[in-house]
Amino acid sequence: MRSQTIEVVTGSRERVHDITSECESFVRSCGGDGLLNVFVPHATAGVALLELGSGSDDDLLAALEELLPADDRWRHAHGSRGHGRSHVMPALIPPYATVPVLSGRLALGTWQSIAVVDLNVDNLERQVRLSFLSD
């Protein structure tokens, strides 16, 4: 297994941050066939495979706002208003994803991208662990 950590600046707003190019670069350096595991070691972020740049990222944030409103209903109540929802989100968008790699290339679908989903406006930076598993 080969592994690398990348730093992602998500900033002080809710964000769907595209990390596909970083993942592509990593698996290209590994070469061969295998699996890429993408893991965000944070309690308030997730990893999603979805189409980006066509409005889907904004649609995802809008859907999460509807499902998990940023208000005062959350028992986990430290940090900014609605912070508790950030701790619930990884149950819906898990902090990991696994993607097949063929000949050093991600085997994503035509419109699929890999993104970090972060609703936590209190954390400006995230780490992402990329692990390449092969035989």
Image (spheres, rainbow, N blue to C red):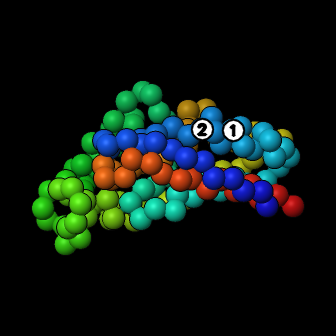
Q: Which of the 4 quarters of the picture holds residue 1? A: bottom right
Determine the residue positioned at 84% across, 44% down: 31
- Locate residue 101 relative to residue 60 in the image: left or right: right
* Residue 98 x %, y %: 63, 55
Query: Is there CB contact under 8 Å for labels 2 and 1?
Result: yes
Determine the residue positioned at 42% across, 43% down: 10
Q: Name the residue under label 2.
A: 20
Q: Quadrant of the C terminus?
A: bottom right
Visible in this render: residue 9?
Answer: yes
Q: Which of the 4 quarters of the picture holds residue 89? A: bottom left
* Residue 106 x %, y %: 70, 41
Q: Name the residue under label 1.
A: 24
Determine the residue positioned at 78% across, 39% down: 28
- Locate residue 47 relative to residue 61 in the image: left or right: right
Look at label 1 and name its amino acid: Glu
Mark 2 surroundings: few (<14), some (14-19) or many (≥20) residues within 10 A: some
Look at label 2 and name its amino acid: Thr
Q: Toward the viewer: 11 or 54? A: 11
Q: Which mark is residue 135?
A: none
* Residue 51 x %, y %: 49, 35
Determine the residue positioned at 39% across, 47% down: 124
Mark 1 surroundings: few (<14), some (14-19) or many (≥20) residues within 10 A: some
